Image: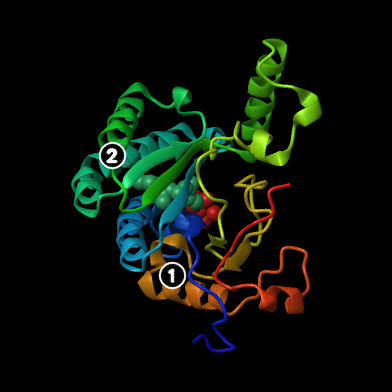
């Protein structure tokens, strides 16, 4: 039986805005790229912790559509770290039976990174031990524009009818089409912004802001975020009384 402080189940889908690599490095008198290297190491830790904690979907904001504006050396380092991560993580992905995927426009990624991404996606496509998603060259507004363009093409070709358009249909054009919406979105580094990340999918998500910079966000911090999540009541526009009549563990979202 759940206690009042932990009234619901663990989240099915946790999404993380990994922020604060630069500040972690600066606080130690190190270059920003040292922070990214430490941050990349921590991605491995948190992927493992999240699988151990039974989280079915883990989505990490690794590179936003806006991150191309950073200095070239920094973008190059992030791409290098990503390539290294994919090579090193292949064994872990196989061992844990994870399905790897991306959201965002990966056609703009450097060719070597894109090839590694496509290889990892293809090799893990039939795994069912949980889904690890990297958001790469991702931005919610770009995602929505892309979805609307694809939908408009279908309307023009007579495959879709605007009169019957509902959220379920429109959301099937998003990068996240076959994923559940995030239940819990975590942001590290003390910033309280969502920065163009899963804006529509997070409509009913719980948000958790942690003061620690990403390289220091460990398993215990993830567990603390889960505890905070379990202590909340998700009402989806209903009253608490209505909710308590239903099973609290059925986090079903309204579809329209
Ligand atoms: C934000 O820190 C971090 C990012 C730009 C994205 C996250 C990147 C990593 C964790 C490293 C590589 C990723 C993988 C998957 C291998 P920031 O630079 O914005 O920090 P600041 O706000 O303190 O400057």
Query: Which secondary structure, mark 2?
Result: helix
Is 207 displayed left or right of 87 in the figure? Answer: right
Query: Crowding near pointer 1: few (<14 within 10 Å), some, many (20+)?
Result: some
The residue located at (45%, 28%) in the rendering is 106
- Judge whether residue 9 can be spotted in this image: yes
The percent position of residue 219, horizontal first and vertical second, equals 36, 71
Q: Which mark is residue 110?
A: none
Does label 2 point to a residue whose CB lies under 8 Å from ligand 1?
no
The residue located at (46%, 50%) in the rendering is 60
Front residue of 203/177: it is: 177
Front residue of 201/135: it is: 201
State the separation of the CA atoms marked 2 and 1.
25 Å
The percent position of residue 134, horizontal first and vertical second, equals 43, 43
Is 170 displayed left or right of 78 in the figure? Answer: right
**Outermost residue to the right:** 163
Query: Which secondary structure, mark 1?
Result: helix
Nearer mark to the viewer, of 2 and 1: 2
The percent position of residue 202, horizontal first and vertical second, equals 64, 53
- Judge whether residue 32 can be spotted in this image: no
Looking at marks 2 and 1 on the same chain, the residue that comes earlier in the sequence is marked by 2
Q: How many marks?
A: 2
Q: Tell me the quarter of the picture where residue 6 sits.
A: bottom right
């Amino acid at each position: 039986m759940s206690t009042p402080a932990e009234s619901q189940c663990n989240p099915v889908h946790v999404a993380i805005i990994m922020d604060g690599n630069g500040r972690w490095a600066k606080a130690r008198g190190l270059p920003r790229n040292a922070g990214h290297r430490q941050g990349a190491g921590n991605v491995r830790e948190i992927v493992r912790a999240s699988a151990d904690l039974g989280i079915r979907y883990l989505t990490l904001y690794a590179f936003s559509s806006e991150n191309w504006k950073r200095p070239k050396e920094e973008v190059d380092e992030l791409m290098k770290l990503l390539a290294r991560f994919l090579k090193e993580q292949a064994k872990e992905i196989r061992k844990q039976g994870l399905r790897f995927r991306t959201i965002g426009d990966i056609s703009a990624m450097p060719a070597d990174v894109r090839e590694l991404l496509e290889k990892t996606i293809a090799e893990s496509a039939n795994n069912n031990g949980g889904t690890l998603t990297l958001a790469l060259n991702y931005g919610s507004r770009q995602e929505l524009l892309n979805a609307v363009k694809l939908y408009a093409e279908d309307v023009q070709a007579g495959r879709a009818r605007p009169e019957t358009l509902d959220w379920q249909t429109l959301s099937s054009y998003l990068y996240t089409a076959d994923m559940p919406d995030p239940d819990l979105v975590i942001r590290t580094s003390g910033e309280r912004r969502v920065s163009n990340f899963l804006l529509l999918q997070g409509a009913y998500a719980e948000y958790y802001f942690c003061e620690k910079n990403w390289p220091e966000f460990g398993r215990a911090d993830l567990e603390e975020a889960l505890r905070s999540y379990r202590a909340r009541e998700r009402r989806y526009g209903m009253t608490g009384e209505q909710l308590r009549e239903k099973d609290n563990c059925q986090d079903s979202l309204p579809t329209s």
